[in-house]
Every structure is written in structure tokens, then in C-alpha cells.
Image: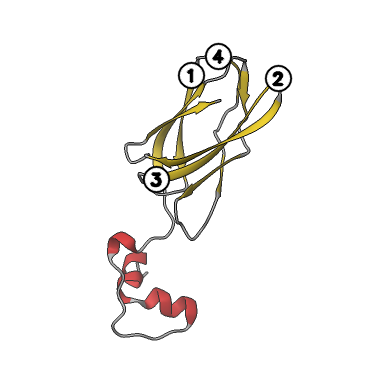
Amino acid sequence: MISKNALVKSGSLISLLFGITTTSFALPTNQAVALGSCNNVELTFKNGTTQTISIPKDGHRVKNKGSIEGWNKLSLGAARTNLQPGDSWSNTLKLNIKCVTDAEFEIKWSDNNGDHFSKFTSVNISDQKATFTLK
């Protein structure tokens, strides 16, 4: 079995995907993988409103800034209801993006006024932690 790194280093992956033959093409190992996996990221959600809010399990999105793959669905693994003003809730997840300093998140939440989406840009998850103040 040929490893993914061996294919990428030799340029054979490109040949397989596009039917191109090359003898001098090589990608640096640190740039070879377009898709990522950032394990055990603690996401903390803080209620920055004056009302009780709820955060659903699904309906969120995440992406690496400038990524060719765009937005990915984000499931929190659990929902949180009745989060009081000023209170926080954390959940640890495996994200389907790279651990970078400029990740983007779109978090869905609701209060008495309906559903809301808060967008967060340039989020540093390289330390496997992120805090989102929902307001």
C-alpha cells in the first residue's frame, strides 16, 4: 500500500487525480494536506446577552480562512438550553479543519426574539481552545 505522503511528495497524487504526468513536481509536506483535523478543541460559549439563551446541537459551521473546501457543518455533540446571562458552557470536540490561528465559525443560538447567527473570524484554535461570546 502506498502512503498518502509518498503520493503527495512525488506528485503522483496530482497525476492520479488529473491524469497529468510530471517528473519535477513536489509539494512541501506541511502544505500537502488540504483537509484538516483538529482534535480535542474546547469550545466555550458565553451568554453575552441580558436574556436566557439556547444553543442547539446542530446548525453551526466552521472553516479555515482561505480554504478551498469552504464551510463545513459543525455539530456540538449536545445542545444547551437555558444558559443564563453571563454564564458559560464548554464542549470539547474534534473539528474537521486544521488547528490554525485564523479559523472562522458561525454559531447558531436563540433567545426570546428568535434564532440568531453569530460569525467569528480570525479565531485562534492552535492551542485547542476558543471562546465565543454570543450577543
Residue named by callout 4 = 85
Question: Up-down: is 78 above or below 94?
Answer: above
Q: Which residue does the numbered mark 2 point to in the structure image?
A: 112
What residue type is disc 1 on? Ser
Foreground tag (1 vs 2): 2
Residues marked 4 and 2 touching at CB (< 8 Å):
no
Query: Looking at the rendered structure, which numbered label has been put on residue 102?
Result: 3
Q: Can you give x and y, in whole percent of width and height, for residue 116 in the image?
A: 64, 32
Instruction: Give the number of the disc on residue 88.
Output: 1
Task: Look at discs 1 and 4 and give the one toward the viewer.
Answer: 4
* Mark pair 1, 2: CA separation: 18 Å
Q: Which amino acid does label 2 sit on?
A: Asn
Name the quadrant containing residue 112. Answer: top right
| 135 shown above or below 84 | below
Circle 2 sits in a helix, a strand or a loop, which is it? loop
Q: Which of marks 3 and 1 is in front?
A: 3
Count numbered badges in the picture. Answer: 4
In the image, residue 122 sits, relative to residue 55, either above or below, namely below
At a point 51% along the width and 58% down the height, the residue shown is 69
Element at label 1 = strand
Is the residue marked by circle 2 packed among few (<14), some (14-19), or many (20+) residues within 10 Å? few
Image quadrant in which the N terminus is located: bottom left
Mark 1 surroundings within 10 Å by alpha-carbon count, few (fewer than 14), some (14 through 19), many (20 or more)? some
Q: Where is residue 124 in the image (x, y as percent from the top left)?
A: 37, 39
As helix, strand or loop, the secondary structure at mark 4 comes to loop
